[in-house]
Image (cartoon, rainbow, N blue to C red):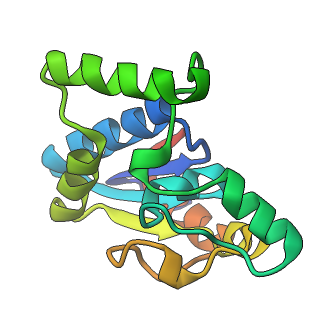
């Protein structure tokens, strides 16, 4: 049996504002407490590590996905009550009024604290997302076996 380390593995499946926010809050909190942190971004979660406004995809379906899924932290909306972007604007304003660290700053803090941002190769292939579409601070794309290796040795694992 693998001995557990003081390590957190987060699987980020959702590309919703509230869920991505929670993921980065947990990751930065754990990293600040001295834990090793790995974030594995898959499917819609890849939006959190895409460059802003990038149109992805080469084929017809990939281009359609790219149009619907313009990535980047500034494009994501809440999981409920998005209301055509009004919900995103409202949540960002409410967080600013309450002194909550904005999502781009949280991601930057995670990077500065040494959190590993790992994109899922299979999800990138399916959604026709190139490595060049992602922020440069990401690791090279990895498969589920790599994520499972990290999860196996982690004392804490979350799926968000």
- Residue for point 79% across, 70% down: 62
User: 86 above or below 152?
Assistant: above
**Can residue 151 be seen in this snapshot?**
no
Coordinates of residue 79 in the picture (x, y in percent) = 58, 26
Q: Is residue 148 left or right of residue 150?
A: right
- Residue for point 58% across, 77% down: 142
Q: Is residue 105 left or right of residue 73?
A: left
- Residue for point 39% across, 47% down: 74
Task: Choose between 101 and 52: the one closer to the eye.
Answer: 52
User: 67 above or below 73?
Assistant: below
Task: Choose between 118 and 151: the one closer to the eye.
Answer: 118
Task: Choose between 80 and 38: the one closer to the eye.
Answer: 80
Q: Is residue 73 left or right of residue 32?
A: right
User: 51 above or below 159?
Assistant: below
* Residue furthest right in the image: 60
Coordinates of residue 152 in the picture (x, y in percent) = 54, 58
- Residue for point 64% across, 53% down: 69
Q: How many marks?
A: 0
**Can residue 22 be seen in this snapshot?**
yes
Q: Quadrant of the N terminus?
A: bottom right
User: 41 above or below 138?
Assistant: above
Coordinates of residue 55 in the picture (x, y in percent) = 60, 69
Coordinates of residue 18 in the picture (x, y in percent) = 45, 29
Q: Quadrant of the C terminus?
A: top right
Please tell me in which quadrant of the rendered image residue 36 appears: bottom left
């Amino acid at each position: 049996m693998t001995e557990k380390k003081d390590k957190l593995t987060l699987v980020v499946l959702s590309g919703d504002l509230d869920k991505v926010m929670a993921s980065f809050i947990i990751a930065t909190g754990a990293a600040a407490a001295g834990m090793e942190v790995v974030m594995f971004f898959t499917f819609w979660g890849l939006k959190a590590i895409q460059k802003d406004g990038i149109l992805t995809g080469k084929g017809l379906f990939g281009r359609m996905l790219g149009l619907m899924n313009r990535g980047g932290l500034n494009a994501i909306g809440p999981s409920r009550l998005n209301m055509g972007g009004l919900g995103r604007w409202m949540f960002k304003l409410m967080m600013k009024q309450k002194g909550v660290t904005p999502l781009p700053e949280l991601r930057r803090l995670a990077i500065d604290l040494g959190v590993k941002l790992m994109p899922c190769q299979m999800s990138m292939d399916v959604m026709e997302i190139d490595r060049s579409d992602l922020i440069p601070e990401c690791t090279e794309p990895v498969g589920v076996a790599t994520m499972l290796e990290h999860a196996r040795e982690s004392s804490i694992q979350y799926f968000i």
